[in-house]
Image (tube, grey):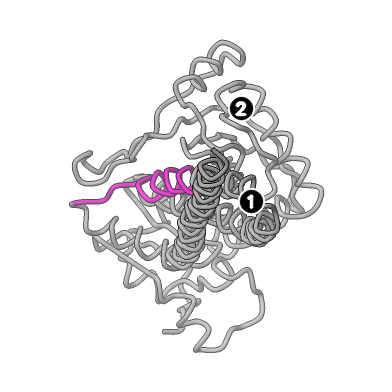
Amino acid sequence: MTPDETVALDVATGTILAYRLFDVAYAIDLAIAEQTWARTVRTESSRGRLTTTPAKAVAFGVPPVTLGLGSIVLDLPEGPLQATVTARLYDFGVVSIALRVGVTDLSWAAFSQRLNAIDLAVGLAPATALWTDLLDRVRKGVGDALVRPIPSTLEEDYIVGVVTAFSEKITAETLIGRLDMVPLLSGEQRPLSEGARRDLLRHRYSYYTDDLVVLTWDRAFVYEPRGDSDVIDVIEVANAQLLEMRYYDELLDAELPRMYDLVEATRRRWALPGARRFADLARRLYTMVAEVTELTEKVDNALQVTEDVYLARIYAAALELFRVPTVSAAVDRKLSIIRDTYTALYDEAHASRSEVLEVIITVMIAVEIVLAIIH
């Protein structure tokens, strides 16, 4: 359906949220993070929860900790804008930093332009220092809460345009026909083909007649007149899960060639020390598999959806759109290869020991026979 641009529809109130997610540690002790933050930074922190959904329907596996980081000024072509900054810590080692820019009384075209301008401003090279500084503040503020910290080499970014009120009451179905969402959802200014438009708007969901969620790979639009943030939280969790799965996928990608080299090197050693090295290598691989499995289970259980069908649909669509099941399946395959390898190593170590024992027993019998003949 082609948007009807002859009738103006303005954004009365809304928010633009720009996210950057970092993998910072093997895990984060959230209790220590809260205590350390309160002691060193002395600003508020809170445990995350879905605001309107009953806990028995949807709940965080381990509620993340939200930290207040004050506000910053973004330099945009239209002028400086103030953004409120928060950070959310997940127990599986991910930090999500969000910039929130309030919006009032903007035309839809201006709202889309501002979102694109913010996305460009926080995505260019100078903005790297912005995100790095904010992340450093979080790292210093939580101190020893980071369990086995790692360099932040992997990141995910996402931007969401949220409208809580338009200039008139409107239904979700009418909204799609009245507004051109392509510039906001794609960042493109040139007209897209009809097929591309359909693909862009394919992942859209409504529960009531007056709410709407449209998901894409790196952007989303949310119309929620009641101000609920549950959908936004669900999208953030899905991004955090993608980031963590990507980390373990790359970790195992690097580990497999190293594992093959170690196995080959161990096989070239002499039998008895070789058996011990096989066992040591197998224990090392087993420890890694146990750690990765424990963390991936935490990631899988980051959000538990039982009764809320609407949020479950959005959550499942976000996971599928972000390719989380695909990356998770790749991690499982690589873990399976490593499991098979350490099983084979244990069997080989056992076989090597058995061969050595057989040789020792044979030698002892031969010695006894020789001694008996001599005596």
Residue that mark 2 sits on:
70
What's the residue type where badge 2 is placed?
Gly
Q: Nearer the viewer, residue 188 or 299?
A: 299
Mark 2 vs 1, N-terminal side: 2
Q: Nearer the viewer, residue 148 or 198?
A: 148
Closer to the camera in the image, 312 or 110: 312
Residue 346: x and y in percent read 48, 52
Q: Pinpoint residue 287: horizontal percent, then vertical percent.
A: 50, 42
Asked if residue 114 can be seen in this view, the reply is no
Q: Does 294 appear in magenta?
A: yes
Q: Nearer the viewer, residue 176 or 330?
A: 330
* Residue furthest right in the image: 126
Amino acid type of disc 1? Glu
Locate the C terminus by quadrant.
top right
Q: How dense is the environment of label 1, judged by Cα within 10 Å: few (below 14), some, or many (20 and up)?
A: many
Read off the residue under disc 1: 155
Classify residue 120 by image quadrant.
bottom right
Classify 214 as above or below 22: below
Q: Secondary structure at mark 2?
A: strand
Q: Residue at x 45, y 79 (%)?
A: 4
Main secondary-structure element of the magenta-colored stretch: helix
